[in-house]
Amino acid sequence: MAESKVGTRAIYQPGASSIEGLPTALQMFHAHPPVMAMPHWHAQVEVNYIMRGTVHYRMSDHDISLQAGQMCLFWGGQPHQMDESSEDSIYAGAHLPLVYFFRMRLPPNISTRLMKGETLLTSATDDADVQNFPRWFRYATSGDPMKSQHAVDELLLRIERIALEPYTMTSRAPAALEGDHPQAHSSRSIARMCDFISANFLQDIDTVDIARVVDLHPKYAMNLFKKTTGMTISKYINLLRLSHAQAQLMGEGSNVLQIAMDSGFGSISAFNKSFRNIAGMSPSDFRRDMRSMIGNISVAG
């Protein structure tokens, strides 16, 4: 994170220890939300609880404004940008890898609609959330494995409770059809596939390797994954690799070819094509523009 000199503003910058650099880790946060110089993406479902102030997000096909007492969930695989954050704002929440997300007992249609780009918004929060989110963050960052696991378990239960109270799904995209999701038991297979992909996405893996882990035929595994997540297995693997590469591009003296190889891409051309598909620009241009924006904001102060 790079501090600007415009008041106490902070500009979010991807890095090796950020959600982009650790795309398979569950990370919790409790802080003033920094605005983003550019849209970013990551391979986790994001949970935001606004404790104070207001924020505004630009999603791929809709905008959303949040105020104190509201909570939202969205799939971070779609490029998104927090472009406004009031000076007094405080938010808390987490980034959930799919392996955690698909182990929760959310109604399947919520999962499907989130993965297709909709945002879940709820105002059904209470005083317990004000106390619990900061505590979960303290536990998760305490270094105590028991406290960390306790925080994760409580957080997942809290997210499941969202479905028991009023909420809305926000998007300009058409709503997902009822029944456009697998049976609940299939989510266990998806979680196991995500687990394997998370541990091996930087290696040369394919659908046969992944299907073998869950004792499914490769074609069935591909169809199940697509139906559950709204994307192919190869697209998810690419997203993990691109998230990892996005963070590496911000490192000093980073070499684009080396980043492509280290991120699991077999060639610079495959890396450039995949990166352009999600960012709308080449990796080199992304690095240049991000650094230039952050530098200009700092100088302006």
Image: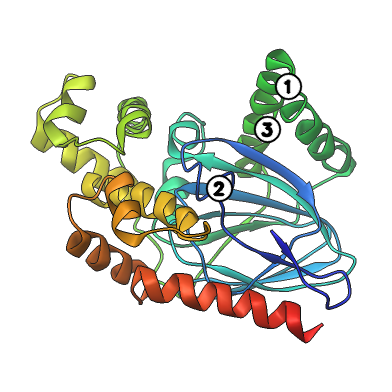
Q: x and y percent of residue 25 in the render? A: 53, 35
Q: Is residue 232 left or right of residue 23?
A: left
Mark 1 to mark 2 CA distance (whole Å): 18 Å
Residue at image x 52%, y 56%? 251
Which residue has dot 3 on it? 155
Check the picture and name the quadrant holding the C terminus. bottom right
The kind of residue tagged 2 is Ile
Q: Is residue 274 left or right of residue 37?
A: left
Helix, strand or loop for disc 2: loop
Q: Quadrant of residue 127?
A: top right
Asked if one can make out residue 38 in the rendered structure from this viewpoint, the answer is no
In this picture, is 49 found above or below 296?
A: above
Of the two numbered discs 1 and 2 on the same chain, state the one appearing first in sequence.
2
Q: Is residue 41 left or right of residue 93?
A: left
Looking at the rendered structure, which numbered label has been put on residue 143? 1
Q: Residue furthest front?
A: 253
Which label lies toward us, 2 or 3? 2
Mark 3 to mark 1 CA distance (whole Å): 17 Å
Q: Residue furthest top?
A: 146
Residue at image x 21%, y 29%? 210
Q: x and y percent of residue 107 in the render? A: 48, 40
In this picture, is 7 found above or below 3?
A: below
Q: Are marks 1 and 2 in contact (CB under 8 Å)?
A: no
The kind of residue tagged 3 is Leu
Looking at the rendered structure, which numbered label has been put on residue 19? 2
Q: Quadrant of residue 205?
A: top left
Asked if one can make out residue 23 in the rendered structure from this viewpoint, the answer is yes
Check the picture and name the quadrant holding the N terminus. bottom right
Of the two numbered discs 2 and 3 on the same chain, state the one appearing first in sequence.
2
Helix, strand or loop for disc 3: helix
